[in-house]
Image (cartoon, rainbow, N blue to C red):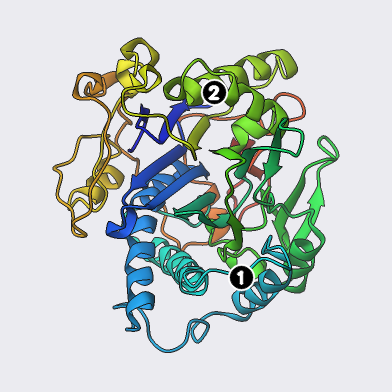
Amino acid sequence: MFLNGTSEVACLYTQQGKKGTNQDAMVVWENFSSRSDTIFCGVFDGHGPFGHMVARKVRDSLPLKLCTEWRANVSGHDSPHQNGSLSGSMNSEETTSISIDDDWGESIDEDEKLPENYIPLKQSFLKAFKLMDKELKLHPVIDCFCSGTTAVTLVKQGQDLIIGNVGDSRAIMGTRDKDNNLVAVQLTVDLKPNLPREAARIQQCRGRVFALQDEPEVARVWLPNNDSPGLAMARAFGDFCLKDYGLISVPDISYHHLTEKDEFIVLATDGVWDVLSNKEVVDIVASAPTHATAARALVDCAVRAWRLKFPTSKIDDCAVVCLFLEPTSPSDPSQESDPREMPAEQAEIKVLGSKEEDKEEGHGSVEAHTPVSTLEHSYTFCNADEIVPISEEHKVEKVPEICQSARSLADCISTAEEEEWSALEGITRVNSLLNLPRILSGDKRSTSWRKWL
């Protein structure tokens, strides 16, 4: 499932905010890697001028890379991309991060036994994320110098749950405590620059971490000698202007063994977490009339919370994936999707691995793709009656000429754009990327303050 939709075990919903193109993306892949008991889920929050393209590219390519690496690890053969050991070609920052994650990034009980599939899948996550970032750096169309995306992804195989997280999107779980009360359990850590270990790594690499006076609660990552770009996360795909200064794309890996008390998992971008608490999210999903409407109900509540809490701020994009651990029977009416719950202009299906996948990034349009799968896996789609082509007015305009990553940061940021943004518009808003005025080379001067999210 690609955009708004529902199946027996999951539902997805995304809604564009008030800042322009929806830069959020999401995916649910059932029967992942041709395993009937395995599901892959992910949400991605793009930022920067081409963040929407980065998020979509990662959504389309990362699951395929993970599947390939996992199969190679299980079979004992090197994947087509592997050359030597896992960390052989990683830079020192990436290797350091992996060792850090081994110590603190895994939420594993001391008495809990790790399943056999954990180590191969963890290695597959690390390798797939590394290859994904490398592909973005070399991509001929998408400029990722000052654009990137978060990614919170999970693989559920039977009762085993492995999560790979980069950035500040979040995964939580709704479960029952000993008194049978529904409680929220946070499954991931928001990887922001204010975390001591993240800040230490960035500063060790000569990057700077500090918050602006106007928003003292938001720590940001800055270049050593330039007040840019002000990235509000410590790990991300893309953003290669900061990759030499402490920003990494190595995922924080965690494992959880599911029990009969666990009811559902929610993955969402920060447009939800900025205005709703973990407990509020769990209560909203649990109180939804049906499983099929849970994701939209959560997004609707987040939008209302934005208007109440931050009336002068622009509402952020929201994307939600709800994975239900105890699916109802197929005959349950709760699984029947109401077409009214799914706006026609946002209902869409896409097959991962399609040969046409790069057309979206090259032309900025959203099209239905021919169902060609290179992995021969099965898919779960919405009912045919719910699939309506996206309207022309919601298609993204042709991407303007972009700057190449080889250009300087100043030249890249000074690229002309039709729309200008106020740098600190609104109140108490965690912006992913911020740019301040600066003096450029020669007689060129920055004439606008812009904010990217």
Q: CA distance from mark 1 to mark 2?
A: 36 Å
In the orientation shown, which residue stands out farthest toward the top?
A: 340
Residue 116 is tagged as none
Is any part of residue 448 visible from this angle?
no
Please give the name of the residue rendered at 36% of the width and 50% of the height, measured from the top-left corner.
Answer: 57
Image coordinates of residue 326 in percent, x first then y, are: 48, 37
**Residue at the (61%, 70%) spot, across then down:** 244
Q: In which quadrant of the rendered image does the N terminus lie?
A: top left
Does 249 appear above or below 150? below
Above or below, 162 against 278 in this view is below
SS for callout 1: helix
85 vs 57, nearest the viewer: 85
Q: Amino acid at mark 2?
A: Val
**Type of amino acid at the residue the image marks with label 1:** Asp
x and y percent of residue 180 in the render? 71, 32
Q: Is residue 37 above or below residue 395?
A: below
Q: Residue furthest bottom?
A: 84
The quadrant where residue 75 appears: bottom left
452 or 71: nearer the eye? 71
Name the front one of labels 1 and 2.
2
- Viewer-proximal residue among 426 and 259: 259
Q: Examine the rendering and report whether any part of residue 243 can be seen.
A: yes
Q: Which residue is mark 2?
A: 299
Residue that badge 1 annotates: 244
Neighbours of disc 2 within 10 Å: few (<14), some (14-19), many (20+):
many
The answer to the question of whether label 1 and label 2 lie on touching residues, with beta carbons closer than 8 A, is: no
- Quarter residue 181 falls in: top right
**Label 1 or label 2, whichever comes before in sequence order:** 1
